[in-house]
Image (cartoon, rainbow, N blue to C red):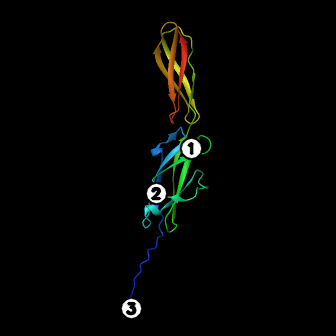
Amino acid sequence: GIELYRMQLQSDQIAPTGSVSINNGATHTNSANIALNLDATDAVSPQDNLQIAFSQDGVNFTAFEPFAIWKTLALEGEDGEKTITVRCHDEAGNTVEFSDTIVLDRIAPSATLTSPTLTNSPLYTLAYTVMDNVDGERTLSEQITLLQGPNSISRTVTDSAGNSLTLTWTVTL
């Protein structure tokens, strides 16, 4: 007898979909070492068969590697805005890219006292300017009461990336 076989071929012309989140969606980091949370799905290829590659400039990518739900990377270059692009392809070679951005800031802010360090009034306006390489400049002020003689006043300034600096000024009444 004759045996007939029916073969059904499935054509895959649709790229996978996916997403990446740097440091659980953080907008800033003070460390070049980051964690990527990854997700990718495809209509035909199982997730275990997807391949991913990474780029920090959108042009040069690492070699493809098997899909994983997380990956650690070290950000390259100077502080500033960094975009990580993930390229993902399925078994048929359909490719998609997705990306996320984070600001790398490894430098603590600085501050300058703008009010006088010698006063004759116990009601004193403490004014200082905070400068940061990423966040820019801001001026802060508050009313405090001074005691007779030298007064040690400390403030901690922190930028968006979590870098902080504690400053101490002496103001004499």
The outermost residue toward the left is: 1
Query: What is the distance, in whole Å, between disc 1 and disc 3 at their CAs?
Result: 67 Å
- Of residue 98 and residue 6, the one placed in the foreground of this image is 6
The residue wearing badge 1 is 81
Residue 44 placement, left or right of 152: left
| Residue 89 position within the rendered picture, expressed as x and y whole percent measured from the top left | 51, 63
- Circle on res. 100: none
Q: Please tell me whether mark 1 or mark 3 is closer to you in this view.
A: 3
Question: Could you tell me if the residues under marks 1 and 3 are in contact, i.e. CB atoms within 8 Å?
Answer: no
- Circle on res. 18: 2
The residue wearing badge 3 is 2
Query: What is the distance, in whole Å, between disc 2 and disc 3 at their CAs?
Result: 47 Å
The quadrant the N terminus occupies is bottom left
Q: Please tell me whether mark 1 or mark 2 is closer to you in this view.
A: 2
User: Nearer the N terminus, badge 2 or badge 3?
Assistant: 3
| Residue 169 position within the rendered picture, expressed as x and y whole percent measured from the top left | 55, 17
User: Nearer the N terminus, badge 1 or badge 2?
Assistant: 2
Q: Please tell me whether mark 2 or mark 3 is closer to you in this view.
A: 3
| Residue 121 position within the rendered picture, expressed as x and y whole percent measured from the top left | 50, 9
Residue type (three-letter) at the residue carrying disc 3: Ile
**Mark 1 neighbour class, 10 Å CA radius: few under 14, some 14 to 19, many 20 or more:** few
**Mark 2 neighbour class, 10 Å CA radius: few under 14, some 14 to 19, many 20 or more:** some
| Residue 33 position within the rendered picture, expressed as x and y whole percent measured from the top left | 54, 43
Q: Which residue lies at the image location 55% right of the left edge and 14% below the top edge? A: 170
Residue type (three-letter) at the residue carrying disc 2: Gly
The outermost residue toward the bottom is: 1
Residue 131 versus residue 148 in the image, above or below: below
User: Nearer the N terminus, badge 1 or badge 3?
Assistant: 3
